[in-house]
Image (spheres, rainbow, N blue to C red):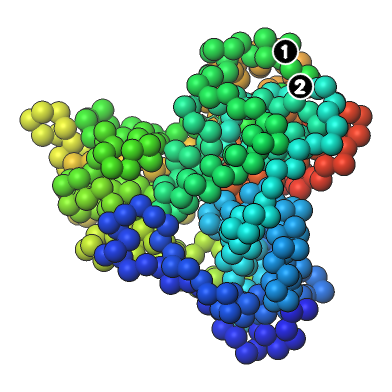
Amino acid sequence: MADPKGFLTHDRELPARRPVDVRIRDWREVYEDFPKPALTKQAARCMDCGIPFCHNGCPLGNLIPEWNDLVYRDDWREAAERLHATNNFPEFTGRLCPAPCEAACVLGINADPVSIKRVEVEIIDRAFAEGWVAPRPPERKTGKRVAVVGSGPAGLAAAQQLTRAGHDVVVFERADRIGGLLRYGIPEFKMEKRHLDRRLAQMEAEGTEFRTGVNVGVDVPAARLREEFDAIVLAGGATAWRDLPVPGRELKGVYQAMEYLPPANRDLAASPISAEGKHVVVIGGGDTGADCVGTAIRQGAASVTQLEIMPRPPADRPGSQPWPTYPMLFKMESAHEELEAGGGARVYAASTTEFLADEHGNVRALRLVDVEGPAAGFRPIPGSEREIPAELVTLAMGFVGPERGPLLTGLASLASRDFFDARGNVARSVSYETAVEGVFAAGDMGRGQSLIVWAIAEGRSAAAAVDEYLSGRTALPVAVPPTARPLV
Ligand SMILES: Cc1cc2nc3c(=O)[nH]c(=O)nc-3n(C[C@H](O)[C@H](O)[C@H](O)COP(=O)(O)OP(=O)(O)OC[C@H]3O[C@@H](n4cnc5c(N)ncnc54)[C@H](O)[C@@H]3O)c2cc1C
Ligand code: SF4
């Protein structure tokens, strides 16, 4: 245990965010540096519980009390080793994870939980800075070939594990660059892409091959891929978005979040879909919506409003969401701070009924109504209808599952049983295998829209299953069975 009295003597602390008026003028990450003594105190707050609930809260089973203790003892190199034992990419989760581990921290029962995520990111950033993150190429090659379709966190985790196990791994990505939503969904101010690029450099040095601009199913038929490779991992994400079929949806200026964010991420200075000088409305109160808010503000929007159909969540854990579950609480993300500082608003319990056009067919306003619900559905409140200016609208209402394109329909035609589950995701056995022999699925494509930490956990676990399928046994760890339901 780091410090037996640490949790009594130190309060929870996080690094400050850079001032709003400064950070919205650039795209850099929002947090200031965290001084090492402050971090040591945070690590010292860990109680090294007999039953560390944080392990269970983390889908990767990260060894949290162990690295807290190592940081407290100033053994950062060993802390980085321990971190990598369960997580291929702590620099992604340390920045982007909603930290269900912290919701499960025992200290959180009657005090503020340990700042686990901050300790995680500081360890890995130091490890990269010190040059401790070296390529780990395999000691022997198996001669087996594995295709990974999709280069998001699930595909990358599977590819790194399988490459290190000695297989020849090719990652196919239809976009022009590797990274999935880490590259073109998540904005720079949440994670600078240099963190992704340095990890990809490590993977290439280990022998993973990346092929971009290849839409599997279209450019390479699924059946041919199956013939050419000994196994396939499907990690194509859940990219079919939820739409809002109200009058005026077809107007110019109404975009899906994933039509708006990728060009903004591609060209920070001059996106072809820019919010500059426009009244922006973001429909959807989740993380994707917050990413649209922060992006629109940096592009120089005249105003930003975020709409959410659900009522405003509570500030504190309600009795219905007891410790150690992950509670749905009111959050103040960096983008929300920026929204409020600029006079914008988050409007809850509101439903969009229509988009209104100007004389050129561009959206100019949005009609909405307050609603009661969600019990027994959402009911409009009479007399609450109103219009708000909206010259750019982004729809951030989530994703319904994987796309039913030629890749999945082609594989489904080879399947001996149902290729899709009841929710429309790719069905897997307990060993991540789909209904087509030798074809496995991990990440959002199999579990539906989820989180980076789950994608990495599934990618690692699917890799173990593929290794066993190819070699008859495996030393790769399994993080999580595919049937586990998300906590968040
Ligand atoms: C805007 C946004 C912000 C988010 N922010 C967070 C966050 O802060 N924290 C968090 O934990 N989660 C966040 N998420 C969710 C998280 O990004 C996803 O759960 C995670 O990326 C899923 O990983 P994946 O590898 O399964 O799929 P993805 O990251 O979606 O990657 C799938 C890849 O497969 C490629 N592909 C698909 N089909 C083919 C094909 N036929 N041929 C070749 N390539 C193909 C796609 O182009 C894509 O690059 C966010 C999601 C969005 C949309
Ligand atoms: S990956 Fe997420 S849940 Fe796991 S330790 Fe890191 S922040 Fe916590």
Name of the residue lying farthest toward the front: 131
Under circle 2, the secondary element is: strand
Residue type at tag 2: Arg
Residue shown at the point (70%, 60%) measured from the top left: 80
The picture places residue 212, in percent across and down from the top left corner, at 53, 24
Q: Residues within 10 Å of mark 1 (few under 14, many from 20)?
A: few
Looking at the rendered structure, which numbered label has been put on residue 145?
A: 2
Front residue of this view, candidates 192 and 465: 192
Q: Any mark on residue 228, and which? A: 1
The reply, left or right, for residue 52 in relation to residue 305 is right
Q: Is residue 279 above or below residue 164?
A: below
The amino acid type, in three-letter code, at marker 1 is Glu
Q: Is 147 placed above or below 266 here?
A: above
The image quadrant where one finds the C terminus is: bottom right
Above or below 301: residue 117: below
Closer to us: 72 or 463: 72
Residues tagged 2 and 1 counted as in contact (Cβ below 8 A): yes
Q: Residue at x 54, y 19 (%)?
A: 214
Q: What kind of element bears circle 1?
A: helix
User: Is 264 or 401 nearer to us in this picture?
Assistant: 264
